[in-house]
Structure formats: structure tokens, C-alpha cells
Image: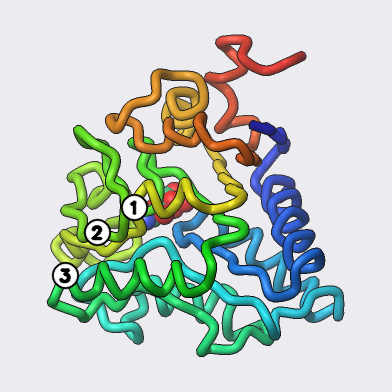
Amino acid sequence: MKIYQAKDYQEMSRKAANIIAAQIILKPNAVLGLATGSTPIGAYQQLVERFKQGDLDFSEIRSVNLDEYKGLPKDNDQSYAFFMRTNLFDHVNIKAENTNIPNGLETDIEAECSRYNSVIDQLGGVDLQLLGLGNNGHIGFNEPGDAFENGAHCVKLTENTIQANARFFATIDEVPKYAYSMGVGNIMRARGILLVASGSAKADALYKALFGPITPAVPASILQLHSNVTIVADEEALSLIKEHNCLPA
Ligand code: GLP
């Protein structure tokens, strides 16, 4: 596992964008696993700038997103489909037909999960999976639990996640209670993983994920078993790790 330290959110975003840009340049038809949440927004902005400068070409890039709220149509401004269009897809030359996000409106859970697993398989797996980190250690919407989920599944969101995501909705009652998510197995099968974390609210989860026991109670802790994980985190997110002297000086 490589851990890159950044002094703040801006630097974290630039470093993360460098790694994603390198993937796009080295493999122009790469399959990118994409993430939502506020943490990756800065990296997406950097990628958009580099595209505008002519340094990146997304025309052959394929993408699969980690998750989507169940019950939200893709034009709802809180859906992850909307997030991806406004933060990245609408500003680069990725082809809409090459982007994949779970269908939040599908009510047949089994059908949607098996469709999404097939989408990932047919793309030949993910080359680089971008991940944020939930305050409770979740990745995608894999919430703390008793077991690691393998494939795509429908999740009942925890109270902690509903509260954390309430800031994006007018009232807490509007936050969806369920979501479709890639499983931990889908994530672990990615050939490379890039996790970004910023701010002191992530310090505890990041410490437990990288240096605590590997347990489904902290879903991100399974990343310790992946052979190609890169972490880009800012000083605040790394504060507890530094306090425990887990990083080389
Ligand atoms: C949501 C997403 C996760 C994301 C997490 C953290 O729950 N499903 O993929 O990592 O939020 O979001 P933020 O980056 O806004 O803290």
C-alpha cells in the first residue's frame, strides 16, 4: 500500500488527479471505477482542466460507478447519475454509452444487481477504482456489518450515513434509505485502487481502515489485503495515523 500525504484538499485533489490522468494516458480505453461524495470533486475538476488543456482524452474511456441511491431518477439533482454528469461527464469527451451507474429506479433488486455485475464483467473488470471513505469506514455504500458483500447489492443505509448525507438534501426525510452498491468483492477485484480522504472527520475511519483489524465492521479495512492500493490523504485525515506513528517520518 502506498500512502501519499497532501497538505490540504487542493493538494490531495491534484495528486489524485495525477494518478487518474496517468491511468488514462497509459491505457486510453481503461475502465475507471468512479466514486461520488464531496471528496473526489476536486480531482474531477482537475481532470476537466487537463482535458480542456488538451492533455487528456476520454473518448475511449469506460466507467462504472460504485453506487446509486435507490428510488432517485437520474435527473434528480441528488442522484449520483446527476452528480457524475455535472462534475465530470458533461465537461469531458467521454461517451455517454460508455458510462455505467446502477439504475436507482429499478425496483427488481435481483435483476438490477445481476445486470450491474454483468456490466462490470463484460467490461473486463475495473483498471482503477476510485474510492472515497465514509465517516464510519464505508466504501461505496458497503456499510459496517457482519460480513463483506461480494457482488452488487441493495443496502439499507445506516443512520450515520443518512445523517452525513443529509447536508445535500432539503430535509433529512428526503435522504433515500436504500442504495444500490458494488460489493466489496467487486471493489477488491479492481486491478488498482485509489482511495482519497480529506478532513478530520475521516481521521478515525482512515486509521482503522489502514492500520486496524480487517473486519466487516470497518468495510474499508479489507483494502489492506489488496496488492495495489494507493491512498492520497490530507494532513487532517492522516492526523490519527501520524499520532500513532504509523507513517515513516
Ligand atoms: C457516500 C458515498 C461514498 C462516499 C461517502 C463519503 O456515502 N456513497 O462513496 O465515499 O459518501 O462522502 P464524502 O466524500 O462526501 O465525505
- Which quarter of the image is occupied by the C terminus? top right
Q: Residue furthest right?
A: 54
How far apart, in angstroms, are the residues tagged by discs 2 and 3? Answer: 8 Å
Q: Residue at label 2?
A: 153
Residue at left offset 61%, top offset 14%: 246
Residue at left offset 24%, top offset 59%: 153
Q: Where is residue 172? Give x, y as percent.
A: 19, 59
How far apart, in angstroms, are the residues tagged by discs 1 and 2? Answer: 6 Å
Q: Residue at label 1?
A: 183
Residue at left offset 51%, top offset 80%: 99
**Colour scheme used in the picture?**
rainbow
User: In terms of depth relative to the viewer, which is nearer, 63 or 6?
Assistant: 63
| Amino acid type of the residue tagged 1 in the rendering | Gly
Q: Are marks 1 and 2 in contact (CB under 8 Å)?
A: yes
> Is 142 left or right of 47, judged from the image as shown?
left
- Which quarter of the image is occupied by the N terminus? top right
Which of the 4 image quarters holds residue 155?
Answer: bottom left
| Amino acid type of the residue tagged 2 in the rendering | His
Give the structural element (helix, strand or loop) at label 2: strand
Which of the 4 image quarters holds residue 167?
Answer: bottom left
Q: Residue at label 3?
A: 109
Q: Residues within 10 Å of mark 3 (few under 14, many from 20)?
A: some
Residue at left offset 27%, top offset 70%: 114
User: In terms of depth relative to the viewer, which is nearer, 50 or 209?
Assistant: 209
| Amino acid type of the residue tagged 3 in the rendering | Ile
User: Where 222 sits versus 208, above or below?
Assistant: below
Q: Where is residue 97? Give x, y as percent.
A: 51, 89
